[in-house]
Every structure is written in structure tokens, then in C-alpha cells.
Image (cartoon, rainbow, N blue to C red):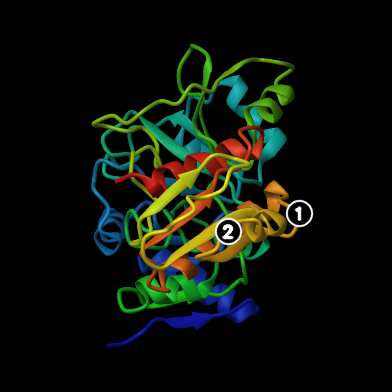
Amino acid sequence: MPTASILGESDGDVRMAGRLLREGHLVALPTETVYGLAGNALIEDTVRRIFSVKGRPLIDPLIVHVHEWKQVEELCPDIPPLARQLADAFWPGPLTLILPKAPSVSDLLTAGNPTVAVRMPAHPLARRILQAADIPVAAPSANPFGYISPTCAAHVMDSLGERIEWIVDGGPCQKGIESTIVDVSGPGALRLLRPGPLSPEILSASLDGTPIDSRPPGETDKPVAPGLLTRHYSPHTPLLLVSHGELPPRAPEGRCAWLAISRAHAEASPSGYERYWFSETGALEDIAQSLFAMLRSLDAQGYARIYIERPPADGLGLALIDRLTRAAAR
């Protein structure tokens, strides 16, 4: 079977990636969060192919990536002032805003919602490609729907290399988990839909203390943003979560892995486990950066079960718990 061709960071490759996107091809590219499966958001057949390649249900909306504010105004003519404040504070960066969409924005892109998800990524290579393409680009994570998100080009090749033609290799992703999503489309309180690298406290502080409703939205038949389905980011191997600071059971059934927050806690586990850790120290930023890569690595090793320690439930830990809880759902 043919496999995708790899593009790099040269000016020629960036121009080529931009041209491919304008013409309606799919190009997997890096962002600071995870790798995205990018396509021209203005061509409906291209958007439909993104759903098809991923096996993604049409009820799950896509995020549109832009490189300048003018593109946001074309997608969303009525931008709330608080949305502009958040964008000024955190764009380019790992923040997605849910905004009222223009009539011209495809209902396929938004899963029929009257809103559209928009982000301006910070990854230097992604920004160069978006500038070269000079179009809004739809880009969900570059993996089969529901599987572990990709944080390097090799992950994309493993999962989608036989389904797409082009992958841009920009090295490992810095943040390692998907963007924070905030709904700013309505007149009421701002609502956190998906926790991510930017915590509600950080966001609220940029708005002079304007509160952000961070209660979990739960699963609906028609989500307004990606990443809200109960089961997501899931390996094939069953995951079992262990409370922060605790250890897995003493008598594992079959060949099992224990993935702890820190090295010291991994080494304290009962005998019978193959031991791993996210970080030497347990720093949450290190855990986020390595989370999906570790899950992919362990999933490929044939374990009967993978036991994982929950991170502490504060700051970035909330986003990590969100990903792990959905990954463990059955």
C-alpha cells in the first residue's frame, strides 16, 4: 500500500504544503498541541474527506485554524468583545473559541450548529504553512476517530499513512494535549467546554476576573465542540485509572503495565507490573507532553491491562484527567 510523503521545514516544502491545502488536498501538520489533519475549510468536498479519512461521525464539529484576525471576521462577523479579549491575550496559542458563525460557513464543518470553533495556532511551522495557504483550514487531530491523538509525525504515519498523501514533520508537539475550548458565542457566562493547556483561572485572570463556567458539559446528541464524547483518545488495551498517590492492585491479572506520575511512585508499585512513569519529577507539563506518546507506546506492547495514576486535580491536571477518563471509558 502507498504511504504518505513527508515534507519538512524548508521554504519550498512550506510553499508546497500551502498550495496543496489551497487546492483541496489533505495535509497532516504539526501544531503546538497535537498534529492536525488539515484541509481547506472552504471546500465542502475536502471537509467531507476529513470526516471520511478519520472515520469521524458528522455530528462532531471541526476546529478551523487561521493565521490572521481578518479570517476570523470572515468566519464570524459578530464577535463578542470578551472573545476579542481572550484572542488578544492568548492567540497565537492553544485556545479555541466557539463563536457565532457567518451564513457562508458550511454546516458540514460545524455539524449543523450555528457556531464555529476557531483557533490561531502558535507552532512556527504551522503558522508558516497557514500563511502560505492563506485560507481557513479545518484540522482535527490526525488519527482515526476515537484513537490516541498524535504528537509526532511517526504517530500520523502509523495511523493514517495509507489514507493520506502528505505529512509535514515539525518534530514533537510542545504542549502534547489538545487546545482549551471556551464557548463565547452567547450573551451568558463564558463556558469551558474542553479543558486544555490554559486553565480557567488563567483565562479568567485575562478578563479581569470575569468568571468562566467550568462545570463539565457532558455528552449530548449534538456537541458544539470536539472532544466532548464520553469515549475518546482511547487505546485498544483496557485502561484502569488509580487515584492520585495510590498504587495498583497487588495481584495483577495477566501481563500488566503500571504508568505512574513520577519515577519514584512507579518504582514503589507491587511486584508483577512492568513499570513506567510520565516524568522524573511528576511535573504536569512533562506529563501532558508525554501523555499520548506513552499511551501509544504501551498500547503496542500487548498488555492485558494498563494501570495509570491520575494526576492531581488542579490546573493542567484537570485537562489530563479529562483525557485519561475518556481514554479509559468503555
Q: Please, which residue is most extreme toward the top here?
A: 188
Q: Residue at x 41, y 25 (%)?
A: 217
Asked whether the viewer can see residue 292, the reply is: yes
Question: Looking at the image, which is closer to me, 254 or 70?
Answer: 254
- Picture coordinates of residue 144, whole percent (x, y): 33, 62
Residue at the (42%, 64%) spot, across then down: 22
Say whether residue 207 is left or right of residue 260.
right
Residue at mark 1 to residue at mark 2: CA–CA distance:
26 Å
Q: Secondary structure at mark 1?
A: loop
Q: Earlier in the sequence, mark 1 or mark 2?
A: 2
Q: Which residue is mark 2?
A: 31
> What's under tag 1, amino acid-wise?
Thr
State which quadrant residue 114 falls in: top left
Q: Give how far across and how far down residue 55 sits, in percent.
A: 25, 58
Whether residue 151 is visible here, answered yes or no, is no
Residue plotted at (47% across, 45% down): 241
Badge 1 local density, few (<14 within 10 Å), some, or many (20+)?
A: some
Q: Identify the secondary structure beneath mark 2.
A: loop
Q: Which mark is residue 272?
A: none
Residues marked 1 and 2 touching at CB (< 8 Å): no
Question: Which residue type carries mark 2?
Answer: Thr
Quarter the N terminus occupies: bottom left
Q: Which residue is mark 1?
A: 281
Q: Residue furthest bottom?
A: 1
